Amino acid sequence: MERRLSSLDGWRGVAILLVFARHYFLTNNVHLFWIRAAAGLASAGWVGVDLFFVLSGFLITGILLDTRGHKRYFPNFYARRTLRIFPLYYGVLLLALALTPLLHLQWRPADVTHFLYVGNIAIQSDPSLMGIKPWLNLDALWSLAVEEQFYLIWPLVVLFIADRRALRWIAGFMGIALLLRIALLVLPAGHAFEWNYKVLPMRADGLLCGAAAAILFRPGTAAEGARRLRWPAWIAGAGIATILICDHRLEFHSALSSVIVFPCLGILFARLLLIALRDGSWAYRIGKTGWLRFFGRYSYGMYIFHRLINTIGLMRWLQEHTGSLVLGGVLYVILMLALTIVAAVLSYELYERHFLKLKRRFSYSAEMAAPAGSRP
């Protein structure tokens, strides 16, 4: 099991590279055709967040299914999640507070929402909360808030509906999410696309599809689960292909994405994940690729660090001093990727891993242990 789950690390690496490409290819300020074409492809990199959601839903639900009979089901789960997520998340926020006099950061009372994991909701009424002027960019924290809110609810759901009937419940939850997204699009509510993209329960499709994959995977094999999702995945793929043909892009700020793309991506990635757990499959081989697994190992830190500091000024400086928008833009992307990797590796090896060692104090009994290789 551990060996098979390790193949998911590579797909976590794919997810972070997609997100990075989305954010940096679109801001390189270069207008050559081939670079804009690459940026057009990279603009769909936001789907990397959906892949993260499916992976999280699968791994978390798997742990909950495997340990729901344990007497410390809730305390151990939340202790282990806290040790994985909080040290880096709050470490970054507290470090920013400490450096406020040096960086002249302009904190406001509403910024406390980031400390409470509700920043994804607060920014709907005040988009300026996505950053702390003049340097700090907290936009990426919205998806971590979505996952943390999911963790508060989902263990209780799994405890009571952890058999095959849970698939019906998941389908029902996805239906409710769809109806809410449609209602936001129809009703005169501002920022409907942002509400649908960044707030639960509207954004639950990926997490729920990952949970469904975990339920399908547990009783038998990954191959059996993948077969059960074959036709839903073909239909989902056809839906996304139709949108690409008609709209020539895949953008979350659209009614088509709110209604069709979000659930379709969840279904496609859930089947991809189950294929990746099948020894020898094409998705398994990609997931076991060494350099992708490297990115997967440090993906949490990369996700937090990759846009943390506003670096547009650095891009302009490089373009001015190289005398070329193209060379300066390319150097900017390469430099930001390198700095992101260095920051994530140092953070994990020198800081986060010491907290992860404490997870042993909240281990489950041998017969109920969550797969060690999952490392969600």
Image (cartoon, grey):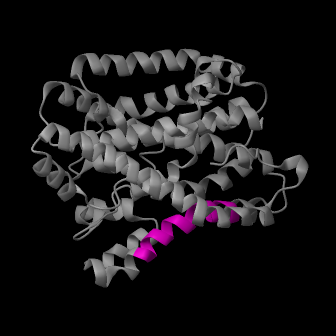
At horizontal 65% and vertical 16% (from top left) the residue drawn is: 227
Residue 107 visible, this angle: no
Check residue 81 for magenta coloring: yes
What is the quadrant of residue 10 in the picture?
Answer: top right
Whole-percent x and y of residue 348?
Answer: 57, 59
- Which residue occupies the foreground of this view, 24 or 130? 24
What is the quadrant of residue 122 in the picture?
Answer: bottom left
- Which residue occupies the foreground of this view, 133 or 114? 133
Magenta span covers which residues? 79-95
Looking at the rendering, in which quadrant would you find the N terminus?
top right
Whole-percent x and y of residue 87?
Answer: 56, 68
> Left or right of 205: which side holds 348?
right
- Which residue occupies the foreground of this view, 244 or 161? 244
Residue occupying the far bottom of the picture:
101
Residue 259 visible, this angle: yes
Whole-percent x and y of residue 219?
Answer: 79, 30
Whole-percent x and y of residue 145?
Answer: 46, 59
At horizontal 46% and vertical 65% (from top left) the residue drawn is: 117
